[in-house]
Amino acid sequence: IARPVSAAFAETYQRNGILNMVLDAFERSGRRKDIIPLLEKEADACRCYEKLVDALLAAGEKEKARQWCVRGFERTVENTSGIAAELQGRLREMAEKEKKYDLAAAYRAEDFFASASRKSYTELRKAAKKARVWPDVRGCVLRYLETGQRPDLSGKEKGSKDWPLPQPEVMKPRNKAEIRYERFPNIDMLIDIAILERRFDDVVALYQELRKTKRWGWDTYKAVAEAVSESHPQIALDIWRAIAESLIGQVKPKAYEEAAIYLRRMCKVYQETSRASDWQNLLIELRRDHKAKRRLMEVLDSLSGKKITD
């Protein structure tokens, strides 16, 4: 079979199928010593870098495995990012097994900068604690979320002098389109981290900043309300009421039922803070403002005069 002209999936699919059959035949016939040479020969054509790296690691050839991870990453990062991500993961796993904890943490930092989330932050925290550099890493990460300035080394950019982690063997190049859509400060992520770390005063302060942006979408607001319902109950009540009124404004029976979820949460907070009269006043106000909505009245009837828990 001729080598594929490009790395397009359709052009490598058939060759990969034949390669897998040959590898299986080698395995069954006891010709395991021929597996690595074949994979090395076909790696660039079939993009079977992961199989080759795993075979090299199983054979104890760590340095060759590392070299193929780097080569494979460089040849797939632009057009086959899934393979590149797997190879980057192999490098991180190798660093962990070799107890190069700072390098392993550097890869976790790469993951976070590429896609900031609670999961990637938690993984970075775990790795950086193992490398005993978490306080410095945490400070740099929070500043990044506030300013958009990455503290690590990236191409020709200079890293912050406060950044305590080494440069990984491979790094994903920054996509101009991705950079264009980034928005800083990343208040949603800062709020998520503050919730994770139970810094509820900071959660409220960041929430107040988020409100000034006038962005649509309730997900972060809901997370804030759930997090601060005990420490800052009025904030939670205000958020839940705004959500409930937004749903009621849709004038749909299904939306009324969803609004009841947030009204129940309000009822629970009112009860826990000894504000039963405020709860009753809220129901009276909703009845007055929406008396023409018969299905909503039925929902409010179900909420009246009962001790409600979620």
Image (cartoon, rainbow, N blue to C red):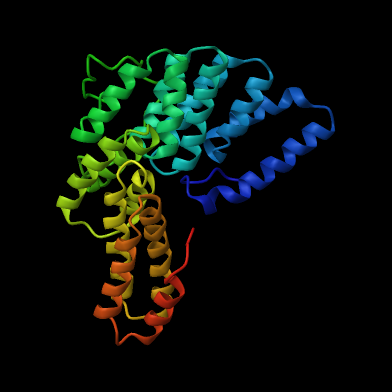
Report the residue at 33% width, 71% height from top. Answer: 283
Task: Please tell me which residue lies in front, 193 or 256.
Answer: 256
In the picture, residue 122 is in which quadrant?
top left
In the picture, residue 249 is in which quadrant?
bottom left
In the picture, residue 139 is in which quadrant?
top left
* Residue ranking furthest to the left: 212
- Residue 310 in sight: no
Whole-percent x, y for residue 142 in the image: 27, 29
Task: Please tell me which residue lies in front, 3 or 209.
Answer: 209
For the image, the number of numbered tags is 0
Whole-percent x, y for residue 292 in the image: 30, 87
- Residue 271 in sight: yes
Report the residue at 51% width, 30% height from top. Answer: 89
Whole-percent x, y for residue 239 in the image: 29, 56
Residue 61 vertical placement versus 181 (above, below): above
Residue 150 vertical placement versus 136 (above, below): below
